[in-house]
Image (cartoon, helix red, strand yellow):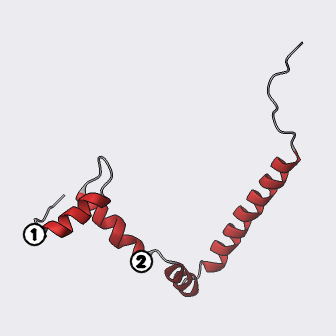
Amino acid sequence: MAVKTITIDMEAYELLAAARRSNESFSTVIKNVLVPASHTASSLLHYLDTTEASSDYLDAMEQVIATREDDMIAAETTVPYSGPEHDS
């Protein structure tokens, strides 16, 4: 992978270092801040409006939601675990 050296002032460095998690590179921190801007609800709606697969995508999403709703209903009807029975 090619690398590029940049110069930043100390204030920018301190902000970058503060945003960094353990074992995370500065490149990852920068990408985490800059890349998500393109992953917005607006970009999703634009994608759905401009692709022929949008109806297939929405059908798949509806199926996932329905499955999760069914799982939640099934979980509500089960008896919660109360632990082992204790004899007196």
Query: Circle 2 sits on which residue?
Result: 38
> Horizontal and vertical percent for residue 20?
30, 56
SS assignment at label 1: loop
Where on the picture, by quarter, is residue 73? bottom right
Q: Residues within 10 Å of mark 1 (few under 14, many from 20)?
A: few
> Horizontal and vertical percent for residue 14?
21, 62
Task: Report, in whole angstroms, how far the alpha carbon at label 2 lies from the one at label 1.
Answer: 26 Å
Q: Residues within 10 Å of mark 2 (few under 14, many from 20)?
A: few
Three-letter code for the amino acid on which mark 2 is drawn? Ser
Q: Residue at x 42, y 77 (%)?
A: 38
Above or below residue 44? Residue 29 is above
Where on the picture, by quarter, is residue 58? bottom right
The N terminus lies in quadrant: bottom left
> Horizontal and vertical percent for residue 46?
52, 85
Where on the picture, by quarter, is residue 81? top right
Query: Circle 1 sits on which residue?
Result: 7
